[in-house]
Image: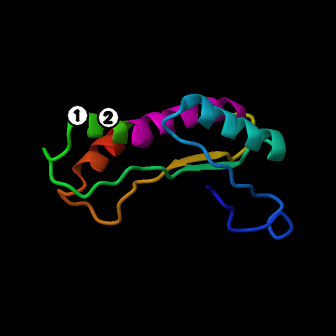
């Protein structure tokens, strides 16, 4: 369950919604809800990631694909859904985070996704 860290009175221009980045329709519905309630955003930050501290070769193909679904496909879905609307907003920004404070061999799967 997602709980916003604020209430409507203290932050009337922000809203938290929850969506599974691996479920396209759920993610698109959450983005639509935000646009319906707040209008087209000036800034979107995609900060979702599956972070697994393992060495290269320790993850199965399925585990890599699960991470890819969040780290890359979720970002693509978000971008393709919201950027056409944001094109009309002067100075709009779409930010995808790097996901790791210090690069290292144990973050190879995250690095592969962010390199995409």
Contact flag, marks 1 and 2 (Cβ < 8 Å): yes
- Within 10 Å of disc 1 (Cα), the crowding (few <14, some 14-19, many 20+) is few
Query: Going 49% across and 33% down the picture, which residue do you hit?
Result: 76
- Rounded to the nearest angstrom, the CA distance separating label 1 from label 2 is 6 Å
Q: Quadrant of the C terminus?
A: top left
* Residue 35 colored in magenta in the image: no
- 57 is higher (above) or lower (below) than 103: above
Examine the rendered structure and indicate whether residue 84 appears above or below residue 71. Answer: above
Q: Residue 70 location in percent, x, y?
A: 43, 41
Q: What stretch is highlighted in magenta?
A: 69-86
Q: Nearer the viewer, residue 20 or 49?
A: 20
Residue at image point 79% right, 67% down: 7
Q: In which quarter of the image is the N terminus?
A: bottom right
Q: Is residue 40 visible?
A: no
Q: Residue 102 carries which label?
A: none
Q: In which quarter of the image is residue 66?
A: top left
Query: On the image, numbered disc 1 is attached to which residue?
Result: 61
Left or right: 16 with respect to 62? Answer: right
Residue 65 badge: 2
Nearer to me, 104 or 62:
62
Left or right, 37 with reference to 75: right
| Residue that sits furthest to the left in the current view | 57
State the residue at coordinates (54%, 42%). 20
Q: In the displayed orientation, state which residue is furthest to the right.
A: 9
SS of the residue under disc 2: helix
Which quadrant holds residue 36?
Answer: top right
Residue 69, horizontal then vertical, whole percent: 41, 36
């Amino acid at each position: 369950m997602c709980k916003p860290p604020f209430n409507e009175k203290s932050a009337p221009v922000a809203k938290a919604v929850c969506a599974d980045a691996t479920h396209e329709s759920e993610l698109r519905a959450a983005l639509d809800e935000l646009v319906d309630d707040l209008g087209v955003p000036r800034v979107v930050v995609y900060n979702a990631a599956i972070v697994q501290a393992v060495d290269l070769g320790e993850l199965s193909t399925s585990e890599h694909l699960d991470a890819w679904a969040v780290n890359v496909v979720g970002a693509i879905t978000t971008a393709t859904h919201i950027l056409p609307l944001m094109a009309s907003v002067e100075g709009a920004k779409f930010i995808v985070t790097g996901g790791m404070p210090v690069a290292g061999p144990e973050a190879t799967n995250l690095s592969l996704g962010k390199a995409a």
